[in-house]
Image (spheres, grey):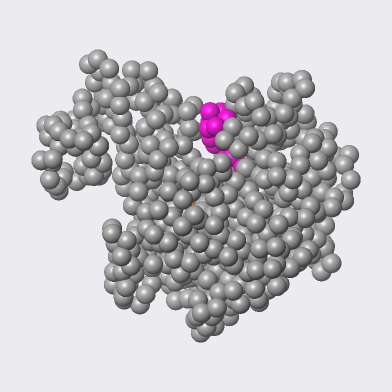
Amino acid sequence: MKKIDSFEEYQEQYEKSIENPEQFWSDIADTFNWKKKWEKILDWNFSEPNVNWFKGGKLNITENCLDRHLKTQPNKTAIIWEPNNPNDAHKTVTYKELHEEVNKTANALKNLGVNKGDRVCLYMPMSLELSYTVLACARIGAIHSVVFAGFSAKSLADRINDASCELLITADGFYRGKKYIDLKQIADEALEITPSIKHSLILKHSNMDVTMKQGRDLWFHEQVNYQSTECEATTMDAEDPLFILYTSGSTGTPKGVVHSTGGYMVYAEYSFRNVFQYEENDIYWCTADIGWITGHTYIVYGPLLAGATTVLFEGTPTYPNPGRFWEIVEKLKVNTFYTAPTAIRALQACEIENVTRYNLSSLKTLGSVGEPINEEAWQWYYKHIGKEKCALVDTWWQTETGGIMISPLAGITKEKPTFATYPLPGIQPVLVDEKGNIIEGNNVEGNLCIKFPWPSMIRTTWGDHERCKNTYFSTYKNMYFTGDGCKRDENGMYRITGRVDDVINVSGHRIGTAEVENAINSFEGVVESAVVGYPHDIKGQGIYAYIICEGNIENNETLSQLVRKHITTEIGALAKPDKIQVVSGLPKTRSGKIMRRILRKVAEGNFDSLGDTSTLLDPSVVNEIVEKRDLVG
Ligand code: WTA
């Protein structure tokens, strides 16, 4: 696949993609290996919604990630695994070895009775085997559902049950920084309430002792090691689901975003090559976890489709010290480095010697993803990491979009700090006002929608198509609604301003306020709660919880700690409130709706502009909330 080489070419390609999307995507799709060519490029409506790309086409994505590279570059490194502990050796896997490992794993899954269309849940450390199992599922047409290994037993069980997964693949445990995560024990707790699970495959990763449940638990190595290194790739329809990935929204429990095989494949490689301007021998490193969409598309699928060398890092930015990222960049001679603003801000707050003691001259391209990047972080990243020589791409996208939607193309698009700049070819963003009118022209602000389909877009939410329709395609007619607010400047460049719904973005992780409220409300003695986001120096947004308790309970540290612990077991540590305030009432309208606007203002410490409170059922609760804000635990 040829990449775009100049801004003029980007403009030409963009025009072409709008005027004739079918021809545009057909030319790109032609560069892949299909077992049978599609009959129709695109068939769509956003009202049901029903979107089909490359209809009738047959393929297997792993043949494109692996087999097609075997002829040209079997001995090229596909994955470099960098362990949590820098004293342990890193490992490299060539394309030939990866092909063999994936096939062995795929044969093991088949042997356990996993068939095309079955769901397999992966709850694993950032290990090589996680990448093998993702691809092994794809090899045999099983649908993978990766659950981030920081989620609680309950969250894991909910996700397993929602998709009726038959197999869970997990590990004994692993270290994240200094902290040991007893993954097997958490998984065991989940498996007590997951009737669909027939087997659990356990990877020996930390070598800690674990108890195996007879008849259910099997060792990964015992099932995989003896398998054949050949496994025929199952023929898939372009529209067959490739994976489910759960993500939070403004209401209810997390939903399983479903991605297709053909469209996702085409867009993953296209966006990877163009945004990062990938070149043949680049070492590429995305620091995300495979448990999130960034890891799916830009650690596993995108780079492997492009035949790149991708780094898979098990650790954290600050262990054993805040120089870890840069030590790895120097050691592996990383050319492209892709991380989240929260990590940049955390490292920016540390001594600069953590950066300057390393040689970062291999770097060509820097990327940012997951949340808006503030100007200070952008400048620090550009200056201290990129030495004012590297391209910096601020990439806006979502779990639902499958791939990067709005972003500079590295070294081609002139950057503007805090702006994701321009849409990729094929992407048609629009800004709309509250009523759904499209806002034309420049120097405007509105809600970000996409008015035309793109190949890697969400197809449905698992088990509940209505929910997909209601969440994304009903707010504005005939448009996909992103949930983000956005500005367009005088040159037509886009700047994402953050969520306009009840989703908070904490350290680049999406958390639904309703989810946290439900978890808090299930804590004994809590009557009601309301959760909002507030600006946080490192995390971008922090979680602020207002809670009403039974009896005369005042704010106190013990209560706050207990609530936090409860959230950790209900959802996971990532959803722990930063601030908890006990209140006697919440600001509600006469119809009983919580006025979050007021709660957000108080959480921000912005008391002067609380706005009109006269419509409240009991305006005095606002005074109490403001007065007691200092007592937050
Ligand atoms: C936010 C992550 C500003 C946004 C790939 C979006 C961003 C949500 C950016 C999706 C960016 C992601 N600038 N905001 N460059 N990238 N976001 O599903 O609010 O975990 O809706 O996907 O993150 O988060 P998700």
Residue 152's place in the image compared with 411, above or below, is: above
Query: Foreground: 51 or 87?
Result: 51
Query: Foreground: 89 or 147?
Result: 147
Picture coordinates of residue 445 (x, y %)?
30, 65
Give the residue drawn at x 59%, y 74%: 22
Residue 198's place in the image compared with 370, above or below, is: above
Picture coordinates of residue 325 (x, y %)?
56, 53
Image quarter in which the C terminus is found: top left
Q: Which residues are magenta?
A: 146-159
Q: Quadrant of residue 68?
A: bottom right
Residue 562's place in the image compared with 120, above or below, is: above
Query: Foreground: 299 or 430?
Result: 430
Image quarter in which the N terminus is found: bottom right
Give the residue drawn at x 28%, y 58%: 434
Q: As drawn, is 43 to the left or to the right of 64?
A: left
Query: Foreground: 71 or 347?
Result: 71
Give the residue drawn at x 67%, y 40%: 119
Please, which residue is most extreme toward the top here? 551
Picture coordinates of residue 237 (x, y %)?
71, 57
Badge count: 0
- Residue 371 shows in this picture: no
Picture coordinates of residue 255 (x, y %)?
50, 42
Q: Quadrant of residue 575?
A: top left
